[in-house]
Image: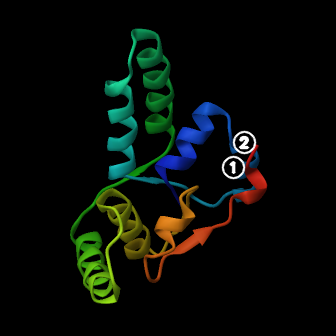
């Protein structure tokens, strides 16, 4: 399973029962996409003050130490291109970052845990994880 940025931000803000989600997953491997790593790091750099920056950086460092980061390589690029073409024919693409995260999940045969179900549900072939029971 790939964890989307929205899930990790909710975990940092304690607006999701992240421990319960991890417990439910048991031994299922989890990872994040390289785009999610970039989005989390961007949030650190964008912090308005040093305290927020330090808190976010500590959280992101812990996430990056514990959860493997999946690269966006050729298999993911091929899946991205195919789904992109399908979406354009069908009426419109998804946001570029979300689209790369979704393509990474599809290319690897993973499901995606996200709080942004509406956007990701538009990506054909992407399996989404229902997180409603973990919301606070």
Q: Residue at x 68, y 38 (%)?
A: 15
Quadrant into which the N terminus falls: bottom right
Contact (Cβ within 8 Å) of mark 1 with mark 2? yes
Quadrant into which the C terminus falls: top right
Extreme-top residue of the structure: 50
Dot 1: element: helix
Q: Position of residue 83 (x, y in %)?
A: 32, 81
User: Toward the viewer: 32 or 10?
Assistant: 10
Q: Position of residue 129 (x, y in %)?
A: 63, 66
Q: Position of residue 33 (x, y in %)?
A: 39, 54
Write down the quadrant of residue 48 in the picture.
Answer: top left
Density class for disc 2 (Cα within 10 Å; few <14, some 14-19, many ≥20) is few
Q: Which residue is mark 1?
A: 22
Write down the quadrant of residue 130 in the picture.
Answer: bottom right
Determine if residue 116 is in view. Answer: yes
- The numbered dot on residue 62 is none
Extreme-front residue of the structure: 91
Determine if residue 1 is in view. Answer: no
**What's the colour scheme?**
rainbow
Quick check: 15 above or below 70?
Answer: above
Q: Residue at x 48, y 76 (%)?
A: 126
Q: Residue at x 43, y 68 (%)?
A: 105
Q: Position of residue 56 (x, y in %)?
A: 47, 24
Q: Residue at x 41, y 67 (%)?
A: 102
User: Toward the viewer: 66 or 53?
Assistant: 53
User: Toward the viewer: 30 or 84?
Assistant: 84
Q: Is 74 situated left or right of 53 in this image?
A: left
Q: Is 104 situated left or right of 14 in this image?
A: left
- The numbered dot on residue 19 is 2
Density class for disc 1 (Cα within 10 Å; few <14, some 14-19, many ≥20) is few
Q: Is 41 situated left or right of 8 in this image?
A: left
Dot 2: element: helix
């Amino acid at each position: 399973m790939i964890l989307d940025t929205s899930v990790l931000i909710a975990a940092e803000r304690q607006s999701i029962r992240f421990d319960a989600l991890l417990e439910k997953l048991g031994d299922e491997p989890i990872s994040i996409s390289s785009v999610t790593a970039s989005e989390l790091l961007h949030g650190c750099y964008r912090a308005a003050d040093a305290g927020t920056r330090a808190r976010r950086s500590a959280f992101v460092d812990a996430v990056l130490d514990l959860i493997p980061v999946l690269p966006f390589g050729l298999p993911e690029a091929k899946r991205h291109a195919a789904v992109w073409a399908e979406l354009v024919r069908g009426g419109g693409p998804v946001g570029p970052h979300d689209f790369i995260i979704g393509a990474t999940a599809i290319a690897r045969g993973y499901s995606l845990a996200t709080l942004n179900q509406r956007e990701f549900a538009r990506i054909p072939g992407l399996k989404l994880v229902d997180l409603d029971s973990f919301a606070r």
